[in-house]
Image: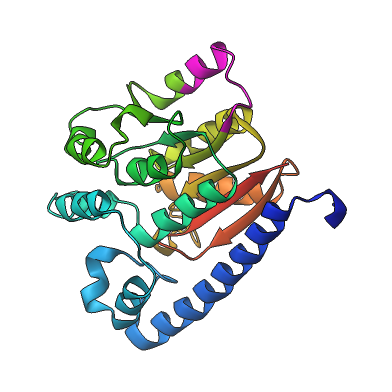
Amino acid sequence: MSFHNVSKEALWGTAALGAVFAAGLWIGKGKSQAFGSTTIFKSHSKGAKDNPLMKYVLDHSMREHPALKKLRLKTLEDRFSGMMVACEQSQLMANLAKLIKAKKALEIGVYTGYNALNIALTLPEDGRVVACDISEALPNMGRPFWKEAGVEHKIDLRIQPALKTLDDLLAAGEAESFDFAFIDADKQNYDHYYEKCLQLIRKGGIIAIDNVLWSGRVLNPEADDLDSQCIDKLNKKIYRDVRVNVSMLTVGDGLTLAFKL
């Protein structure tokens, strides 16, 4: 693609992603050597106190809205808090959504709604996050914080299988009308989510996919480990997918960013 056909925002975004990628590799290498980690760089705010380098990253980069911070701390009290997106990863995605002037976003897998809140904060007043989950129990933990931040009206929580919600959106004529999508749900449906999101995202939009390194298990998936197999298969598919440009980053448990062409 000629640089003459690329927007200024896209060029800045590409440069920023290059810096993030390089930093991720450097930090990942350092963590592996210094802390004996078996993964490249499994960063998460919950474990920052045990990782001086991760604490430094968070202390010198995180700019959380007060309601976001409260929700993160509340979520860390939950026994399933390992499911929460890494806060520095969420901030990166929110910055990307802002960079492309996103107005409509998709979130597949909500948990307590930390990332949905982060994205909603970047959207204009009439923006919308369609948030897909199969239970209201955990997203309801986030509702008071959505309200506190003044963005509860932007988060359209759909409680049903995500594939049904995505099909409903397509049937309603919303194809190619979304700007950003985040996939972080059941791994065996990752490929289905990716294909539906490609239909719903506009050209120039971004699909972000979480857990693409799966704590390193994608390197040699066990015969009975269907989750790892599905993630590995999708990683290889996206690498060859001419419909998108791609960056795979060593942020959190691995983050793929697919930019629709």
Give coordinates of residue 36: x percent, y percent.
35, 82
In depth, the one of 1 and 43 nearer the eye is 1
Residue 185 located left or right of residue 95:
left
Residue 237 located left or right of residue 214:
right
On screen, 48 above or below 202? below
Give coordinates of residue 99: x percent, y percent.
57, 51
Q: Is residue 155 visible?
A: no
Does the magenta portion include 177? yes
On screen, 172 above or below 96? above
Residue 131 located left or right of residue 209:
left
Residue shown at the point (22%, 77%) measured from the top left? 50
Residue lying at the far bottom in this picture: please name it.
34
In depth, the one of 201 and 160 nearer the eye is 201
- How many marks the image carries: the answer is 0
Does the magenta portion include 70? no
Residue shown at the point (35%, 62%) measured from the top left? 63
Q: Is residue 119 visible?
A: yes
In depth, the one of 232 and 167 nearer the eye is 167
Residue shown at the point (36%, 88%) measured from the top left? 34
Q: Quadrant of residue 60?
A: bottom left
* Quadrant of image for the C terminus: top right
Q: What span is in magenta? A: 166-178
In depth, the one of 5 and 235 nearer the eye is 5
On screen, 9 above or below 242? below
